[in-house]
Image: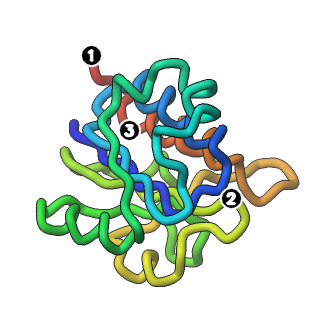
Amino acid sequence: MEIHIVLDNIRSVFNVGSIFRSADGAGSVKKIYLCGMTSDIDNPKLEKTALGAIDMVPSEHYDTTEEALEEIREQNIPIYSVELTEDAEDFQQVHYPERVALVFGHEKMGVGEDILEDSDKKIYVPMRGMKESLNVANCATAVLYEITRGLA
């Protein structure tokens, strides 16, 4: 299993740090693509939350998410955006390919519309309470652990 995480304009440095920790914990994450306004790893607040995980999971900052997706497309890796859309599939009902890129979007705006259009699939985490969505870091953790469930 090879997972690429694309962070599409995540504004909270603490969410980014938490995603690094979850990526390290779940394993199988080859790279985190930090896009647009998403903080680069040189931010001290990021290290405070990541607690060393920035040294465990390779990452790179991109000016735009499109730039990162272009690199992923060149590697023939399917792109799955995690977003609540009419055509999104329940993340627990999806068969994940051996290599996959997961796009997580801005805390309030979600994954950009142009990115959704460029995605091979859209998946969502079903909500059973009153709120429409989870915090992006919690969502990333749930999806990562679902995909890696059963791996040694």
Element type at mark 3: helix
- Rounded to the nearest angstrom, the CA distance separating label 3 from label 1 is 12 Å
Quickly name the residue at label 1.
152
| Upstream in sequence: badge 2 or badge 1 | 2
| Upstream in sequence: badge 2 or badge 3 | 2
Q: Quadrant of residue 81?
A: bottom left
- Can see residue 126? yes
**Residue type at the position of mark 1:** Ala
Mark sitting on residue 108: none
| Residue ID at (45%, 67%) | 122
Mark sitting on residue 147: 3
**Residue type at the position of mark 2:** Glu
Location of the C terminus by quadrant is top left
| Residue ID at (41%, 71%) | 64
- Furthest toward the right, the residue is 130
- Can see residue 142? no
Q: Position of residue 50 (x, y in %)?
A: 54, 26
| Residue ID at (87%, 54%) | 130
Quickly name the residue at label 2.
107
Q: Position of residue 77 (x, y in %)?
A: 19, 59
Q: Image height check: is 93 above or below 149?
A: below
- Rounded to the nearest angstrom, the CA distance separating label 2 from label 3 is 22 Å
Kindly indicate whether the residue at mark 1 contacts the one at mark 2 (C-beta within 8 angstroms): no
Mark 3 burial class by Cα count in 10 Å: few <14, some 14-19, many 20+: many
Q: Nearer the viewer, mark 2 or mark 1?
A: 2
| Residue ID at (44%, 51%) | 93
**Residue type at the position of mark 3:** Ile
Element type at mark 2: loop
| Upstream in sequence: badge 3 or badge 1 | 3
Please state which of residues 124 and 136 is positioned toward the viewer in this rendering. Answer: 136
Element type at mark 1: loop
